[in-house]
Amino acid sequence: MSKFSQLVRVVIVGLLVLCVGHPGMGMRLSHAAEPIKIGMAGPFSGSDASFGEQLWRGAEQAAADINKAGGLLQQGGKGGRPIQLIKADDACEPKQAAAVASRLVDMEKVVAVVGHFCSSSTMPASTIYADAGVLMMTPGSTNPAITERQLSTVFRMCGRDDQQGVVGADFVLNRLKARRIAVLHDKTTYGQGLADAMRARLRSAGHTEVLYEGLTRGEKDFNALVTKLKGVQSDAVYFGGYHSEAGPLVRQMREQGMTAPLISGDGIFSEVLVTSAGGPGFVKGVYMTFGADPRKMPAGQALVELFRKNGYEPEGYTLYSYATVQAIAAAIQATQSLEGEKLAQWLRGHAVETVMGSKSWDGKGDLQVSDYVMYQWDDKGKYREVE
Amino acid sequence: MDIYIIGQQWVNGLVLGSTYGLIAVGYTMVYGIIGMINFAHGDIYMISAYLTAIFLALFAAMGLHSVPVVLLGVLALTLLFTALYGWSVERVAYRPLRRSTRLAPLISAIGISLILQNYVRISQGARNQGVPPLLEGSFRFPAEALDHRFIQITYLQSLIVITALLSMALLTWIIQRTALGRACRATQQDRVMATLLGVNTDRIISLVFVMGAAMAAVAGFLVTLNYGSFDFYVGFLMGIKAFTAAVLGGIGSLPGAMLGGVVLGLAESFFAGFVNSDYKDVFAFSILILFLIFRPSGFLGVPEVEKV
């Protein structure tokens, strides 16, 4: 046999293998187990780490449940690809958030991102995801500006602070009947945004706040500010911020003899507030807005039971995070695509059945319906919805 | 302006300033003796907060509930263990680098600071930690007051001010009146000469770190009881504020550290109370900048002497 005909035969066999093998088994074999990477970004260290834990618990459970059911992108009932969560810690720091966002996009090549949590982190990170065409859905960032910028791949699974501020302001004016209202914030994107929303609603109802000031995150001594609150005879204090500052603030109010209620938003929605205040005795008279308790929704009962059986109370944003993974998975499954723009387009036009009920999004990426209600802390260190 | 509000702000500032002062002592002593800033000092303070909570839990588990016994016991243990941390920082980050460039120990101290923070974060968790209120109640002037027309100082706040004054007095006495203090001052003035005259300068430098850490432990203990919560990051901001206090008072001067702390605390309280709390830190650090420009030696510092 000549060398030439040998070569021809090799080429022919090679071409044959390509023709037969490529569409059927070639793809399937090499990609069968390749996971779909989804970033899970949030504060896993720092003073907001308890929120990061909520997000991680929810997302981890959702990924595990989806993988157990066969993963995503199945074809003909088999060969689904599992979800692999990539944990990214932003410590609620804007600079670190931008850095981990770049890492998720450039090095990990994630398909979508669940997160971030703090609005001040979500803002810079979302720009990076939008530029890279990566779908991002935050389970807990409530600052309006996040979706107002019309970034096409940015969504959220929670309400907005302008809605939250309205509920807060109406409660303070109509239920607590307070008139000398002080508005405080922690100078973060989230905290100040929430305080501004509150103030806007107060003013449109014809009330001017007696005080509007910021405090410094990371400090523990707010005694000077509390004395000032006493000086202006405030009968209700609204605080835009997180529990690590709300705790010491309410404690020092009580220690200085102020009985005025403290009202805040979803940033203090965690039982760690009691620890931050240094005891359940101090949190009586604290109110906060949050979505209607997802633990009570019928769709999530089995999941809540599962969490409790494993010794974890799925409070706060745990179920939001679970639902976020569900929404991303639903979009991937429906479009059979991993392209951020396609996933985003699908999410805008379709409702997703989640553990928190049916969710759908408007053109900006906000939820069509959000349901803020008021919660109240008692002196045992527990909270419940205000009837 | 209401006299009670003004009086209350004096109390607030004095209490805050006393804690700054206690921590500032650690910066100023170390600077005095080796001419370097101990960047791990804020984290030593943070460690003492955790130790306080741990020992409180330990005493509660042992069934001890007498408040004075618990307070003294926890303070003694916290002091002891925090002092150990201070000693270790010197052994690990400073002594091996004593003869290298001036920048080397500075960087190793920053390294220690990061190690301590992350060690606590990993071993204790990143969540906020809290201690239950141990000593509740307050003095009010006048005692029979209507509305909010009174000046109040809680028992714990008065304990903070008194303890700060007492420990400063004790420390000043040690430095000025004992043989140990004489050795410290000798080492501070001229380390080589002190060695030649038979002072074990290595031991003295260790001792200074230990004393600084002990003062930070007193502050950590009192602050933890007063505010009830802390996390692994509290040392950072507190460290910066205390360092500012040390510079204001004149770095290297013991009474200066206390004075600087109180002035900073009062400045912050009055600015937050009567002007605007948004710009409280801007104001505090503007004072620092003005001092650095016009009086770099602070309130009580001596003008810089060239070190050999």
Image (cartoon, rainbow, N blue to C red):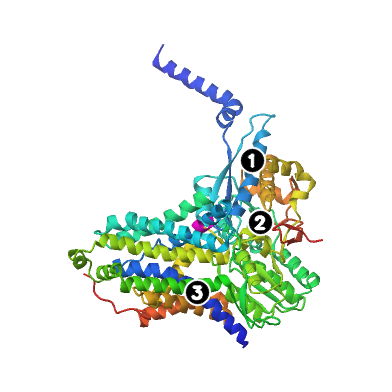
Answer with left or right where residue B51 lies relative to residue A235. Answer: left
Residue drawn 64% across the image and 83% down it: B142
Look at the picture and state if B292 lies above or below A334.
Answer: below
Is disc 1 placed on a helix, strand or loop?
Answer: helix
User: Callout 2, which amino acid?
Assistant: Ser
User: Callout 1, which amino acid?
Assistant: Ala
Is disc 3 placed on a helix, strand or loop?
Answer: helix
Instruction: Determine the CA span between mark 2 and mark 3.
Output: 34 Å
List the residue tagged with mark 3: B161
Please, which chain is the residue tagged with disc 2 on? Answer: A
Asked whether residue A200 is drawn in magenta, I would say no
Label 1: few (<14), some (14–19) or many (≥20) C-alpha neighbours in 10 Å? many
Is disc 2 placed on a helix, strand or loop?
Answer: loop
Instruction: Determine the CA span between mark 2 and mark 1.
Output: 23 Å
Label 3: few (<14), some (14–19) or many (≥20) C-alpha neighbours in 10 Å? some
The quarter in which the N terminus of chain A is drawn is top left
Residue B124 image point, x, y percent: 52, 51
Instruction: Name the N-terminal-most of marks 2 and 1.
Output: 1
Look at the picture and state if A34 lies above or below A267.
Answer: above
User: Callout 3, which amino acid?
Assistant: Val
Residue drawn 43% across the image and 70% down it: B167
Residue A120 image point, x, y percent: 58, 62
Answer with left or right where residue A9 lies relative to residue A248. Answer: left
Q: Main secondary structure of the magenta part?
A: helix
Label tally: 3
List the residue tagged with mark 1: A63
User: What range is drawn magenta here?
Assistant: B49-53
Mark nearest the camera among 2 and 3 is 3
Mark nearest the camera among 2 and 1 is 2
List the residue tagged with mark 2: A270
